[in-house]
Image (tube, helix red, strand yellow):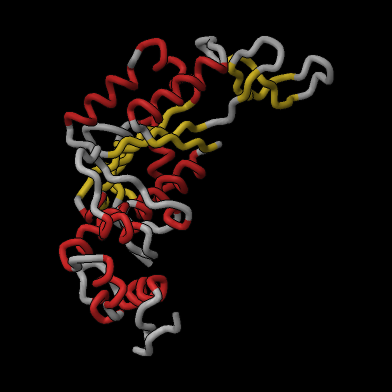
């Protein structure tokens, strides 16, 4: 099992989170966020991930005061690279007036028994305003948004994030089953044919296609190369090399020329 090293704030309101994380967390007076950890970004670069945990009422207050944006600025000045906002607690839209509501325990006026009731969050706000703010954080600021119902869920999300960020982002394959991500910056020069073809090959991302164009002089050279040549390129292992050669219709993994 991979060891986990999380740094959790020593603030009293996060004592329950620290207890739930257990031996995975170290209590420290961290400069930003509620939990921080180091991870890997694109090309294996080191990144600092800063997680902020907020209850629904606290988040609504932040919309009106701008406090969370200020916290983001402080985290950025403290060299944080990735920002995660974890909303903890259930909420819903009131179907009649559209207000944001949260559950509380109280006395049901009809049954006179203790039950879960829903009431507008304080300060009062429209559900649409709350949701739009979250959308803007994700779209315009790049904040990763997570939602949990309780502290156990929050701890689970943090642990999952930690595991995810231990692998460089360009090595994650899940989304590449359906597409290859675009280059990280706008290209003023159209990519060469070799690179465009390389990007479509199984296991070859935009980043790895740079290695391909540095080695091969033409698409014909790519097609004629056997898997051992492909496997010799940086970042391309044996399995990927065999898949590439097979997709190009060249030499098969066993060294026999494929029928065309």
Q: Give residue 188's quadrant in the image.
A: top left
Q: Position of residue 221 (x, y in %)?
A: 24, 72
> Could you say where residue 92 lies in the image, as x and y percent from the top left?
62, 24
Left or right of 30 in this view: 145: right
Name the residue furthest right.
Answer: 111
User: Residue 246, located in which quarter of the rendered image?
Assistant: bottom left
Q: Quadrant of the C terminus?
A: bottom left
Residue in the image at 36% along x and 71% along y: 244
Q: Nearer the viewer, residue 147 or 22?
A: 147
In this orientation, which residue lies closer to the viewer: 186 or 148? 186
The quadrant of the picture occupied by the N terminus is: bottom left
In the foreground, 88 or 217: 217
Q: Is residue 255 above or below residue 77?
A: below
Q: Residue at x 70, y 26 (%)?
A: 116
In the rendered image, the vertical position of residue 228 relative to residue 146, given as above or below: below
Work out whether 198 lies above or below 84: below
Residue at image position (34%, 14%) is: 66
Q: Position of residue 2 (x, y in %)?
A: 34, 64
**131 and 216: which is toward the camera:** 216
Q: Tell me which residue sits at (34%, 37%) in the image.
A: 51
From the viewer's perspective, tell me whether residue 207 is left or right of residue 175. left
Q: Is residue 34 above or below residue 259?
A: above
């Amino acid at each position: 099992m991979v060891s986990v090293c999380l740094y959790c704030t020593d603030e009293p309101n996060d004592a329950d989170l620290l207890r739930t994380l257990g031996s995975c967390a170290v209590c420290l007076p961290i400069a930003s966020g509620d939990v921080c950890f180091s991870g890997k970004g694109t090309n294996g670069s080191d990144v600092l991930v800063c997680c902020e945990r907020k209850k629904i009422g606290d988040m609504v207050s932040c919309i009106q005061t701008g406090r969370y944006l200020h916290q983001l600025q402080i985290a950025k000045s403290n060299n944080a690279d990735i920002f995660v906002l974890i909303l903890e607690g259930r909420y819903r839209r009131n179907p009649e007036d559209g207000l944001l509501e949260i559950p509380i325990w109280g006395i049901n006026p009809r049954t006179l028994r203790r039950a879960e009731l829903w009431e507008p969050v304080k300060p009062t706000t429209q559900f649409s305003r709350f949701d739009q703010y979250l959308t803007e954080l994700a779209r315009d600021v790049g904040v990763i948004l997570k939602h949990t119902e309780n502290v156990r869920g929050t701890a689970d999300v943090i642990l999952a994030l930690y595991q995810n960020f231990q692998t460089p982002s360009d090595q994650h394959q899940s989304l590449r089953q359906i597409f290859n991500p675009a280059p990280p910056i706008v290209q003023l020069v159209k990519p060469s044919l070799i690179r465009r073809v390389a990007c479509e090959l199984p296991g070859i991302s935009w980043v790895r296609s740079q290695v391909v164009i540095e080695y091969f002089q033409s698409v014909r050279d790519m097609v004629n190369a056997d898997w051992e040549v492909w496997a010799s390129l940086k970042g391309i292992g044996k399995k990927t090399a065999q898949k590439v050669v097979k997709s190009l219709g060249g030499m098969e993994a066993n060294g026999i020329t494929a029928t065309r």
